[in-house]
Amino acid sequence: MTTSIWVAVVVVVVALAAVAYLVLRQQQRRSHLRERFGPEYERTVAEHDNRREAEEELLDRERRHAELDIRPLTEESREAYANRWTEVQERFVDAPGFAVTEADQLVTAVMAERGYPTQDFEERLSTLSVGHAATLDHYRTAHEISGRAARKEASTEELRQAMVHYRALFEELLHETARGR
């Protein structure tokens, strides 16, 4: 009888240890994702039916991002892009809508040269969320204003804000020197 009690106690302890391990692992994963994705973590959770699905999507983004050949710009490219940005900003005075469109194209060009996929806006957001979560909302806002500008529905102040938002991501992409930062 005492042997069966000891076996039961050992089984219960092992089961509790396994549950504790799984809970700890899940908390570590969640903490990692929150730190890595910042506000994008909460946005993704809100878009899914449950937290587990959202976290799986974020982990999938990390896996896809790891497969990319993201590389820093050469000093020459960095300088050329910086000069082009200055020209775009100067054009803003006379043609703000056109300048915002150019800013979007310039950000996309930098992304392409760095090795990011650029075919689809949602794909760009997904890929950028892994390493640029802090500036992702800037990019979303700029892109939304740019769309309204194309339909002639954005004010000059909104176009100015779009330029500020594009610049935040542009500067980050321009000066990032290593894969993980």
Image (cartoon, rainbow, N blue to C red):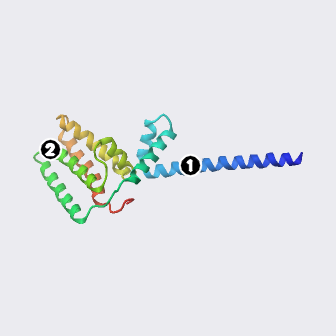
- Who is closer to the viewer here, 67 or 126? 67
Q: Residue furthest left?
A: 94
Rendered-image quadrant of the N terminus: top right
The residue under the point 22% across, 36% down is: 148
The residue that mark 1 highlights is: 27
Secondary structure under the numbered disc 1 in the rendered image: helix
Give how far across and how far down residue 59 sits, in percent: 46, 47
- Who is closer to the viewer here, 166 or 179? 179
Q: Mark 1 and mark 2 in contact (Cβ < 8 Å)?
A: no
The residue under the point 26% across, 44% down is: 142
The residue that mark 2 highlights is: 98
The residue under the point 75% across, 46% down is: 12
Q: Is residue 59 above or below residue 70?
A: above
Give how far across and how far down residue 99 sits, in percent: 16, 47
Q: Is residue 181 left or right of residue 20?
A: left
Residue 6: give its label: none
Give how far across and how far down residue 98 sits, in percent: 14, 44
Name the kind of residue labelled 2 in the image.
Phe
Rendered-image quadrant of the C terminus: bottom left
Q: Is residue 151 left or right of residue 41?
A: left
- Who is closer to the viewer here, 129 or 166? 129
Choose the circle earlier in sequence order: 2 or 1: 1
Q: Residue furthest bottom?
A: 75
Secondary structure under the numbered disc 2 in the rendered image: helix
Counting labels gives 2
Q: Residues within 10 Å of mark 1 (few under 14, many from 20)?
A: few
Name the kind of residue labelled 1 in the image.
Gln
Give how far across and how far down residue 68 sits, in percent: 36, 53
The residue under the point 42% across, 41% down is: 43
Q: Quadrant of residue 83?
A: bottom left
